[in-house]
Image (tube, rainbow, N blue to C red):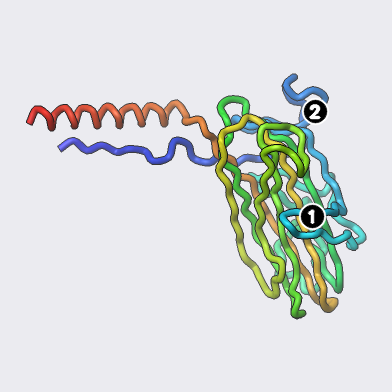
Amino acid sequence: MLMVAIPLALAAPAWASICPGAPTALSPSFTNATGCTVGNNQFSNFVVTSGTTGTINGITLATTTWPTPPTASTIDLNAFGGGIDLTTPGFCGTPTASITPHTFCVGGSATADVISITYDLHAVSGTISNLALDGTVHTHSSGQTGAIATVFREFCLGTTTFSQGCTGYGVLQIGTLNGHNLNQAFSASTIFAGVTDIAIRDTVFLQTFGPTGEYTGVSNFDLTIGSAAPEPATLGLVGLSLAGLGALRFRRRKL
C-alpha cells in the first residue's frame, strides 16, 4: 500500500526579533529610517512614547503617575532575548522577589504607567498573514477593584503609518483588567489576507488602585509573524504529496 503524508500547514509562524542591539541603517526602501532586518522581516521607524492617553479596544488609558516610566533607552526590543522588556529591573513595589526582572511594572497605591512602542514591519519577499501577541502578567492586589496589567497590539494592514483610523485597523489584547494575585501567560492572534507592510503600536497599560503594597507588571511580551507564502521546501513536499495521490488514484482505476 502506498502511504502519502500531506502537510496541513503551508508555512509555520516564525519568531521575529525586533532589533537586537542598536538599530542600524536599512536598505533604501526605508529612507531616513533606522531599524533592523531579521530573516524575511524588516523593522523600522521605532518611536517610544510614555504617558499615552486615549482609548484602545474600548478601554480608557489612565494618565501616567509613575515618576520614572520606561524610555527608548531602557526598553530591550529583542524577542530572542526573552521578549520586549526592560533592560534594567523595574520598580514593582514590595515585595519585588515575586516579579521577574526586566518587567514593565508599577507599585504602590494608585499608580499608573502607559508606554507605547510604534514601529513598521515589512516583508522583504512574500507576504505576512498572521500576527500573534504573547506575554506574562503579574499582579498583587488586595483591593476589590484589582490591578490592571494589559498589553495592546494595534496594527494597520498594508501601510507603514499607524493611526487608529487607518484602513485595515485591528487590535490584539492580552492581560487582565481586574487581576488580584496572578502570574499567568496570555496569548492572542489574528489571521488576515497577506500584506507586505504593517504599522504596529504596542501599548503596555499598568495601574494599581489599592494599598501601598500593591504592584502589577507585564514581562517578556513577544511578536510572532506568520507568512502567507509557502517556503520552497514546503512547496516541494506538497508537490510530492499531490503526485503520490495521483499515482494512487491511477493504480486504483487499473484494479
Q: Is residue 68 left or right of residue 14?
A: right
Q: Characterize the local packing of mark 2: few (<14), some (14-19) or many (20 or more) Cα atoms within 10 angstroms.
A: some
Residue 221 pos. (x, y %): 67, 52
Give the residue number, with chain letter if any, for mark 1.
Answer: 55
Image quarter in which the N terminus is found:
top left
Image quarter in which the C terminus is found:
top left
The residue at the point 23 percent across, 28 percent down is 246
In the figure, 248 relative to 217: above or below?
Answer: above
In the figure, 225 relative to 74: above or below?
Answer: above
- Callout 2 amino acid: Ala
Residue 238 pos. (x, y %): 36, 31
Give the residue number, with chain letter if any, for mark 2.
Answer: 33
- The image quadrant of residue 227 is top right
Q: Characterize the local packing of mark 1: few (<14), some (14-19) or many (20 or more) Cα atoms within 10 angstroms.
A: few
Q: Depth-wise, is mark 2 or mark 1 nearer the camera?
A: 1
Question: Given the current orientation, which residue lies at the most extreme left position?
Answer: 255
